[in-house]
Image (cartoon, rainbow, N blue to C red):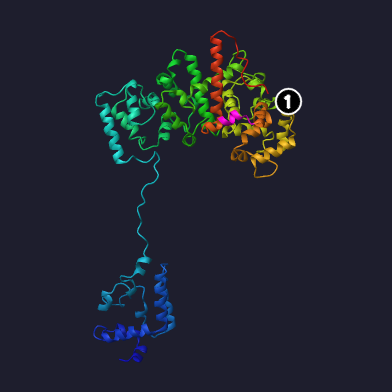
Amino acid sequence: MDIDDVKILDPELLQLPGLSVKSNPLIAEELFSHWLSLPDTARLVKSLIDDSKSSSTPVSISKNCANLNIACGSALPSVFLNSGTPPLSPRGSSSGSPRFSRQKTSPFSLHSPLRSLREPPKPQLIPQFYFQHGPPPAKELKEQCISMVDHLFSDYIDGLRIDEFKTVTKEVCKLPSFLSSVLFRKIDVDSTGIVTRDAFIKYWVDGHMLAMDVASQIYNILRQPGCKYLRQADFKPVLDELLTTHPGLEFLRNTPEFQERYAETVIYRIFYYINRSGTGCITLRELKRGNLIAAMQQVDEEDDINKVIRYFSYEHFYVIYCRFWELDGDHDFLIDKENLLKYGNHALTYRIVDRIFSQVPRKFTSKVEGKMSYEDFAYFILAEEDKSSEPSLEYWFKCIDLDGDGVMSPNEMQFFYEEQLHRMECITQEPVLFEDILCQIFDMIKPEKENCITLNDLKASKLSRNVFNILFNLNKFMAFETRDPFLIRQERENPTLTEWDRFAQREYVRLSMEEDEVSNGSADVWDEPLESPF
């Protein structure tokens, strides 16, 4: 049979029993060879190959074949042009051609990458990456922990008492020992006075505490049930335990009043530096960003409490408390404006003291109007003596920003500097004009915008402390102008110490010398600080 005869072959004849492809195999070969020689077929094959190489979703084969049918007209029977799926069985017949019965899929889909590209990818199992209560501990870590717990509890079948629990806190939990009492009560919810092995495993291992970081562990131990923050009262049991057990604070055991003041001062310092939002509630994020955890670990290993200068130093507490006691003339544990004006041998201006008592930088905790409590004073002295820290910069920025627009304008700075000029004239000191001072301030800070200074500008500069001293602290302003070589040498010798650390060192020496003189009966020198006047 010639190809020309195939062209005019009626497609219906292919369904007749007399025309069997099996008995005439040359017909299929000739038809397929003719189909491959067509230009449209070549274009189709080329487009499919290009699509496969580009790894993009291939064009529907059935759609290309339909286009080919239109181009070829009746050159091929429709039964050979259906490339998407095999043809249906003939009407009225329960069985079709043996060839068709064996071939149930298109030639293009048999072992073809195009077939796999069309099929939707099998779903992949993504491992769990979020755990509401933290990730579970590793198997080895869990087994190691349980082994240690079994060893420690082996001699205490009935459980451990609170005075016996410190070893578990240190060796198993790897936490500071003065957290032992708080952790014990956290587990002993029924106040039985005993913590059993199973109760500890349930809280520490099954409760996902084992896999947490140290900050999260301490945060969950200290916070009250249902609270998402730490309050000042949450730290009180920790400080009580520290005062009872730390060898560096043993001398305070017979003076409960000073024990209480020490604990309060440590808590005030913690919240001053850690609670950056100023809400009085420390969040887990704030706790992780601060250095409190490192200080707690250090104080647990160090016998000399004064070597832990962050938060826990007794000498630092002594300086804060004695400074407050010096100003509190009637010893009612409250100070007013007149008292605060005496601070630093009258170093501060009236205008800045008025701003402090207007409670703009920080609302007072004192319940008496016009009075500052010991906590309020602790915040003040930390801000005053270390103006390079971020809490201090925020404190004094709020004082200078009179209209609360978020910038320190030249007019606002001039308002505070005017009093400094007047004081310099009173002590026959050559005054420095505000225009010159303003240029000096802008040269030091280098603000992003001209003619105003933002809080971010101050935080980005290492000379920000000098700006505030220029505006309202005459003693420190004069020291800055004269460039005291003693202070410069101190900074170079101990570059890691902050302004507050150096101030506390100097003040503790002064106060201890005065205390020795008073003990020797020489004189009462409480009202005669060694700072040079103006």
> Which residue is located at x 35 percent, y 87 percent?
10
Local packing at callout 1 (Cα closer than 10 Å; few below 14, some 14-19, many 20+) is some
Magenta segment: 483-489
Position of residue 254 measured from the top left corner of the image (x, y, whole percent) = 45, 12
Position of residue 228 measured from the top left corner of the image (x, y, whole percent) = 47, 33
Count of labels in the image: 1
Q: Is residue 401 rendered magenta in the image?
A: no
- SS for callout 1: helix
* Residue 86 or residue 348, whichever sits in front: 348
Q: For this view, does 47 lie left or right of residue 155?
A: right
Q: Main secondary structure of the magenta part?
A: helix
Examine the rendered structure and indicate whether residue 259 appears above or below residue 145.
above
* Residue 428 or residue 178, whichever sits in front: 428
Residue farthest to the top, as pictured? 521
Residue located beneath label 1 in the image: 423
> Which residue is located at x 70 percent, y 42 percent?
451
Which quadrant: the N terminus? bottom left
Which quadrant: the C terminus? top right
Work out whether residue 191 can be spotted.
yes
Examine the rendered structure and indicate whether residue 107 appears above or below residue 120.
below
Work out whether residue 62 can be spotted.
no
**Picture quadrant of residue 522:** top right
**Picture quadrant of residue 226:** top left
* Residue 528 or residue 251, whichever sits in front: 528
Examine the rendered structure and indicate whether residue 394 appears above or below residue 251.
below
* Residue 245 or residue 132, whichever sits in front: 245
Position of residue 121 measured from the top left corner of the image (x, y, whole percent) = 36, 60
> Which residue is located at x 72 percent, y 31 percent?
417
Position of residue 176 measured from the top left corner of the image (x, y, whole percent) = 39, 28
Amino acid at circle 1: Arg
Q: For this view, does 445 lie left or right of residue 240?
A: right
